[in-house]
Amino acid sequence: MADSAATTPAPPAEQQPPAAAPAAAPAAEGAEGEGEGPSKKAQKKAEAKAKKEAEKARRAAEREAAAKAAGKTTGPTEDLAKDNYGVVKERKGQFKLSADVEDVNLKNIGEEHVGKAVIVRAWVQNARIQGAKMAFVELREEGAWTIQGVFVASNEGTPVSKPMVKFAAGINPESFVVVEGTVQKPLEPVKSCKVSNYELHIRKIFVLAAAPQMLGMTLAAANRPITNFSDEEPAPEKAAEDGVDKLSIAAESSIPAATMLTHLDNIIMHKRAPVQQAIADIRMEVKDLFRSYLKSHGFKEFEPPCLIGAASEGGANVFRMPYFDKEAFLAQSPQFYKQFEIAGGRKRVFSIGPVFRAENSNTPRHMTEFTGLDLEMEIKKDYREVLLMLEGVLLHIFRGIKERCAAEIELVRSVYPAEEFLLPEPGKEVRLTFAEGQKLLREEGPEEFRNVTDDEDMSTPQEKALGAIVRKKFNTDFYVLDKFPEGARPFYAKLDDANPKVTNAFDFFLRGQEILSGGQRINDPEELEARIIQKGVDPKSAGIKDYVDVFRQAGVPAHGGGGIGLDRVVAWFLNLPSVHLAAYYPRTPKRLLP
């Protein structure tokens, strides 16, 4: 190898590698020759670069001096608003609001608050950021009262800073917060909010209870109409298919409508939905109107038991349960106890409470527990005194909620559209006998009802068909059917003296669906016992014997009353697709939760 290297010719001088330049010498870019140093052009570039670096250093020094003069550090900028926002849990419960600022509810904000600071506790309905210095939140209180909140970061960084703006925009929807801010009038009304003529310029916000990042059901979905009321849980292998194929999406909205099961599994969002709160508010007004009307007419409220020692009304459709060493039952009705109150010396009584029916009926009309509005009263001359009292209280309720709950009714109809509920004009109330109702069905009803008889009870389709006829013929959605056939009424219903085939008993209807049953009761013990035997019930059986014996203890005046299903009154007045929507926590044969 050495011989070979020795015989290899040397490369030309120009191809030999140049000597290494001194470490301090600048790159010879643009040099005219070897060993002559930097050119004038290279020197000018170096000088320009040095001047630029010097200028940068000078400016940095000026900024540092300005920061020090303002009391700032040269490190990361301090958040001067850090005490004005945050998650209370992370702050270990430490947060501070101004002591002299008034707590207000959104519905009460008015002109007197403009320019003043207030404190509001509400849910964050949504939040968004607009640039680094501005954010908007929509705050919601009970009853769908909403207002726009505005955050604007100041140049000084207090009371609102950029980090505070970012924090506010990132709060999860449905988190519960407390805010402090000044009420101002927006440049134009905020149409998306119920409180549209005012907005809050927020300077403090604290998350009192954070919502999860992903909700089981959004508020928008909760406020959509429910169309599927099935109690059946989907089979495991079909769950995914049901989740995709059985979503109900209306043409005007891309938000899917959840099933009733999904609503009940997400009960908090179900109850936060404005439509459900409106229904609940109407329900409470119905109870209040019922109570106030009866009290003004001399009725006394009483409280019947729910837990009883014997099955009432013959023992059908009753819930049984162990009770120490005995068996107990859930009351199907306060019927016997209303009568006991009259027998005990009261002239007029009413009650509001739960009723239980062990009916395995999985329909939009039925629940195993509902709220009953019941009354009983002494009869002076004729059982129609009872009918007129019940008619009066219901008309008072319907006219009252139209007046008191106009906004709530409008909100419900925006989700569940319905025709206007028609009431009869005073003095033109519609009262038909059962036979007259059947005659209308035969003459003006659908073909399948042309052969209905006067001694058979009405089916649900018959009731709805008759309701349609009455609405068209009499221009009302509310009417009475009187003189029900003997076979369609319980053993305590008083028979008509002139025609024992019918009773002094009646039903009231709303949009063709029954909401009330009532009538005169038998107050003579021998007559009562005979009717019990006629109905195939043993008069010596538990509960029944005790009931009959009450009328043997002392003389009991003629009396009558009725029971109203509160849930049905609300549901049918609003024309909801299911009575379950009118209940707080509907109970059905397949549902005991929540």
Image (spheres, rainbow, N blue to C red):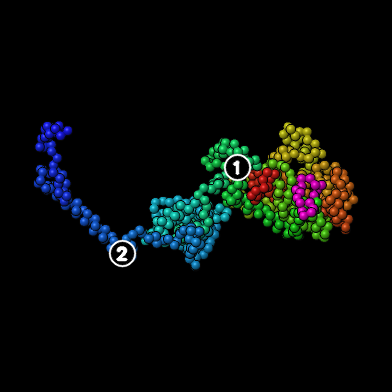
Which numbered dot is residue 259?
1
Residue indicated by mark 2: 68
In the picture as drawn, the residue positioned furthest to the right comes out as 526
Disc 1 or disc 2, which is closer to the eye?
A: 2
**Magenta-drawn stretch contains 313:** yes
Residue 446 seen from this side: yes
Q: Nearer the viewer, residue 289 or 329?
A: 329
Location of residue 217 in the rendering, given as x and y in whole percent from the top left corner = 55, 46
Q: Secondary structure at mark 2?
A: helix
Q: Nearer the viewer, residue 503 or 344?
A: 344
Secondary structure under the numbered disc 1 in the rendered image: loop
Q: CA distance from mark 1 to mark 2?
A: 62 Å
Point out residue 61 in the picture as x, y percentages from the top left corner: 26, 60
Q: Position of residue 570 (x, y in %)?
A: 67, 49
Q: Amino acid at mark 1?
A: Thr
Highlighted magenta segment, given as a residue range: 311-327
Q: Residue at x 75, y 50 (%)?
A: 321
Q: How many marks?
A: 2
Residue 418 position (above or below residue 376): above
- Residue 575 magenta-drawn? no
The label number, if any, that marks residue 189 in the structure image = none
Q: What amino acid is labelled 2 in the image?
A: Lys
